[in-house]
Amino acid sequence: MDWKPAVMMMAVVIMYAVLNVMTKIAFNEGMHTTVFIVLRLLVAALFLSPIAYFKERKSRPKLTIEIFGYLFLSALLGASLLQWLFFLGLRYTTATFASAFNNTTPMFTFLLALAFKIEKINVANRSGAAKLTGTAVGLAGAMVLALYQGPTLIGAPAEHLATAAAHRGAGRWVMGLVALLGFSASWSMWFILQSKIWTKYPALYSSTAWMFLLSFVQMAVVGAATEKMTLEVWVPGTVLQVVTVLLAGVGVSALGFLAMTWCVEWRGPVFTTAFMPLIQIITAGIDVAILHEQLHLGSMVGSVIVVVGLYSILWGKSNEASTIEAGGPL
């Protein structure tokens, strides 16, 4: 068994978890969401473009209008819209709660993969039944996450909880929830789109560099229209904000997206997204220890249900792959 995809995805989820907490702190310090996204994408594009140019200058396919259209859509779904929705949700909720919605991505991805005939399912065998059952269980867990909060298990006492809830506002929490659902759907569509792009433009570094360059332009237009054009707004004001932008741009955006794209091509979109639950587990530990956020019963129960569903899907994929390698029927 080749462990490279699994090891690579483990590294990716650790970076994501650390970044989620650091970004929440940066927002608490007053950094603007759109500004952070624009700077992150700029760093990623500057870091990756020279690498892509020299590494694939002889093997890169010709860039046609059709391919450019796919890359523009990839930038919109996989960077611009995805990040804006996630960080909007993060601003209005908590790092742990936002990370929990990473776990719904495999369900959306699996359902979309079925619709686009990338995935096949046969409920008559164990693999198909496991994938279908896992999807249903995971979606049920996502509903628990969204609709049930429950008592506080770890964190501040009830009096502080009431004060924090009043300060945050139910409307802002709902807005954050809707944004995070949109984030999961957008990310799932990006995973599906990557399978299509690879067949038309099999240049991993170049396609990723194009994605960040185009998404930078997209979000820069949004930023210019919505933010004040002053140094106070656009220049990170603390060391933590600078480190967060660099980690987001180089570590998570550039290297992380390269790793995920490679894993999609190597093991498929469902395998890749099945590692997302680990982001929440790591984030929750850092969130409670450093940000002193509360851990609620609803989040705990919903997350466990979602994880059970996700790994049912992963088991089904693994068993299906073993059957194919053995030459057996699906």
Image: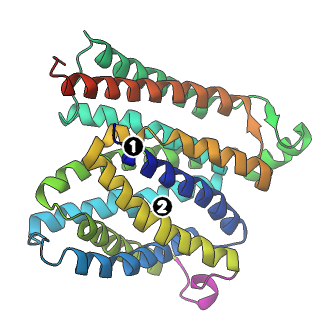
Image position, residue 323 (x, y; %): 23, 21
The residue that disc 1 covers is: 3
Q: Residues within 10 Å of mark 2 (few under 14, many from 20)?
A: many
Identify the residue at horizontal 43%, vertical 52% (top origin). 8
Per the rendered image, the range of residues in magenta is 227-237
**Mark in the foreground, 1 or 2:** 1
Location of the C terminus by quadrant is: top left
Depth check: 93 or 136 in front? 136
Q: Does residue 49 lie above or below 160 as drawn? A: below
Please tell me which of labels 1 and 2 falls first in the chain: 1
Location of the N terminus by quadrant is: top left
Q: Residue furthest front?
A: 1
Q: Is residue 239 visible?
A: yes
Identify the residue at horizontal 11%, vertical 58% (top origin). 200
Image position, residue 203 (x, y; %): 19, 65
CA–CA distance between discs 1 and 2?
33 Å
Is 330 magenta? The answer is no
Amino acid type, residue under disc 1 in the picture: Trp
Q: Is residue 268 visible?
A: no
Image position, residue 300 (x, y; %): 67, 31
Disc 2 element: helix
Which numbered circle lies on residue 84?
2
Amino acid type, residue under disc 2 in the picture: Trp
Contact, CB < 8 Å: mark 1 with mark 2?
A: no
Identify the residue at horizontal 78%, vertical 55% (top origin). 290
Depth check: 64 or 85 in front? 64
